[in-house]
Image (spheres, grey):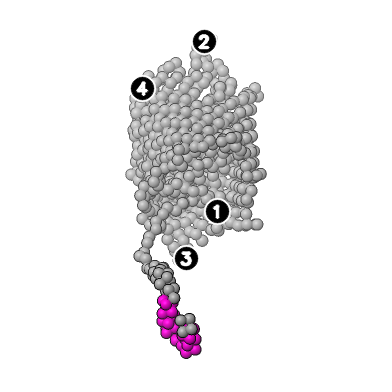
Amino acid sequence: MIKSETILVDDIKGGLEHDKEKIASLLTLWLAGSGIASAAQPEIQSDRMQAEVDTYELPAVTVTGTRALADTDGRLVLPGGFQAEQTNFGLMGDQDVMQVPYTAQSLTTKNFDTFAAPSGDVNQVLANVPSLRVGTSLIKTDFSARGMLANGSAMYLNNVPGFFIMAAGPVTNTIGRADVMVGPAATLSGSVQSYNGPDGGQPVSVYLYTKRPEKGDFTRYRQTMGGYGHYGSYIDVNRSGLGDGTFGVRVYGEHSEGNFSVSGAGRRKSNIFVDVSRETPKTTTNLFGGYYKDHLRGTERRFQIQRTARQVPNAPDASRSYDDPNLMYSGWDGYQITLNHEQRINPHTKWFLNAGTNDMTNRRFIYWTQVTIDGDGNLRGNRVWSQYFYLKSRYGQIGVNHKFRTGVAEHDVTLAVDRSWRVQYNNTRRDAPNAHVTGNIYSGIIYNPSIYSYDISGSLGQKFQYQEMDTSINLMDNVKIGKWNLLAAVTRRHGNYRAAAAWNQVSDTQYAPTFGVTYAPTDRLSVYGAYAKSTTRGQVVGSGYANEGEIAEAVKVTQKELGVKYKFGSMYAALAYFDVNQPNYVEVPNPANPLLPFYRLDGENRYRGVDLSITGAAAPKWNVFGGIQYLHARQQRTQGGANDGLPTDSSAPWSAVVGLEYMPNDDWSITGRMNYVSRGTIIGTGRRELSVPSSAVFDLFANYRTKIGTTPVSLQASIYNVFDRSYWILQPGQGSKLLLSMPRTFMLSATFDL
């Protein structure tokens, strides 16, 4: 058998070497005879089947998912793109918004690109925060937080305080991001200047950050047109990877001028700024600086209702000017410089520096404080004034951050020391009541011809008003234990104040604690509670009081807050209950001289309520943002108990903001926004409650991306106050003052990527 097989194989090798098909057949027979073929057959079939499977043609499959979006500074944003996932938490830097034990929102660049008008201000963006109510006066920075007055003094620029005051705010086209932390949490940031801020303390912190260099190079030119012939030109140049590849430079500037929708009113504005950044594996440095000049005319929106009025008069025509735009103006110019540096020493330790300097000059000829009217709209006792105001501020902060463990606890500790210095010069002249301006807001305002030679603002020189230096030590510890986060912070602030009078000098030391706790059972749900206290030096007591010239007791605003934050689907929501006690100044009887009372911190208001905010992608192509606030604001201790239990001035129980964006494709976006404030109250004489009508204002925005030749172009159209309503805007914390709305305003712009 073996022999015959050998002969057969030899025959195959010799005669059939090139006949592969026959060889295969004979080999199969040979293998079958040896029993090998039956064992190999399943493997051969399996290989064939595998080959068939490998070449099987599947039907088309579509995979969908959610791409994480980032802001221009690289931070991840929440669905919808209007808010970021991280927000500034004072000295702790950027933190996950879910872990911050306060009502906090980080407004992205998208908000500024969409809602900030070229001739407007940052309040048009802050209006998207449900806890805030904003105004329309371009000559004031006033807004409110949970029913309490705030202004530019609550704003930080690149972590530096003291640049802005009631009369002068941020340069809008330089801002790329705004982080809002609601509540008296100034303890978490360092020194805050006390002068020219609200007398009732700081109820909110607004951290503004300038446009930083981005990855990739671009040159953008923007042309705008709005109002009644207001034109603007903007340039934005970005270069990255410079020097050794770690430097980036961004230069942006503006020139705009023309008329508003308010008759005769207008603005002329110019600025140029540069932002230089450097990032290495161990360091991050940013230097920002530039010059600005701004001139407003005919923009008076401030009114005060006499408390003796029987009713609040109807809002007059918002398209009219209520000062003389050919004469009355407010103009300011100056420079701003900030420096931020962070140096990593090792994986657990870093040190940081925040510093800045600011000079600002303001000359203006306007109504003194506001336009005062009675219940029928008649002007009563109004005065005008010329003012020269000069502000110079310097700030420096240095600190260290260290992370370590003690058992199961992870500590994140920050210790910082800062010094804030400011000097102000203020020289004014004002006329007697009714000397130059009389009339009625409906039938017309009458100007005495002598007013046209009364303004001397251009010739007024420097007159020292006050100087302040504050030094603070800040200590914070954020402890993570499993799903719990515990925050403890304390600030020791020592201040030195010197006023114009040689004897008017004071030094004081104040302490302010802050505590917070957060429990996050999952990464999509957190529950928190917080206690915060903010201290503001007391004001100088004016003339007519027994304690004239004294520095009144420091104002300490205290807030307690409970809240929950929740991510569901592509949405984010935050719900908070708050309870705030705010002391205020009142007249106190003087037993020794009934005609000369004391002026002391003996009054108190209380603000309690609930606010809800929401943002995200409600459905494919549809994004939403907004929220609602309920506020119960009451005067608890008033002068002689006259108004105890009544609502605080200009408070309204309900307010809301709702925004909706529709994106039919990658090139189009259409956005609508509604701001609503319910009926409010001003307290008149004899405990009379004067009613201020509710208001609802709608804005519309559209953006379209296209190309002209090979040049990418973004076209934008905006309409503010779509239905052209004239209405009063409440001004919490400012007595019986109201603001008049702005009329319907159109804006068109085209941005070219050159």
Q: Quadrant of residue 458?
A: top right
As measured in the structure, the alpha-carbon distance from the residue carrying label 3 to the one carrying label 4 is 66 Å
Q: Earlier in the sequence, mark 1 or mark 4?
A: 1
User: Which residue is at a point 42% across and 42% down the rendered structure image?
Assistant: 567
Closest to the camera, between mark 3 and mark 4, is 3
Circle 1: residue type: Glu
- Judge left or right: residue 556 versus residue 638: right
Q: Secondary structure at mark 4?
A: loop
Q: Earlier in the sequence, mark 3 or mark 2?
A: 2
The residue that mark 3 highlights is: 710
x and y, in percent, of residue 607 in the image: 43, 27
User: Which residue is at a point 41% across and 76% down the rendered structure image?
Assistant: 32
Q: Secondary structure at mark 3?
A: loop
Q: Quadrant of residue 39?
A: bottom left
x and y, in percent, of residue 61 in the image: 37, 61
Q: Earlier in the sequence, mark 1 or mark 3?
A: 1
The residue that mark 1 highlights is: 214
Closest to the camera, between mark 1 and mark 3, is 1
The residue that mark 4 highlights is: 688
Circle 2: residue type: Pro
The residue that mark 2 highlights is: 591
Looking at this view, is 483 or 534 the one in front? 483
Q: Residue 290, relative to residue 683: is it above or below?
A: below
Magenta stretch bounds? 5-33
As measured in the structure, the alpha-carbon distance from the residue carrying label 3 to the one carrying label 2 is 82 Å
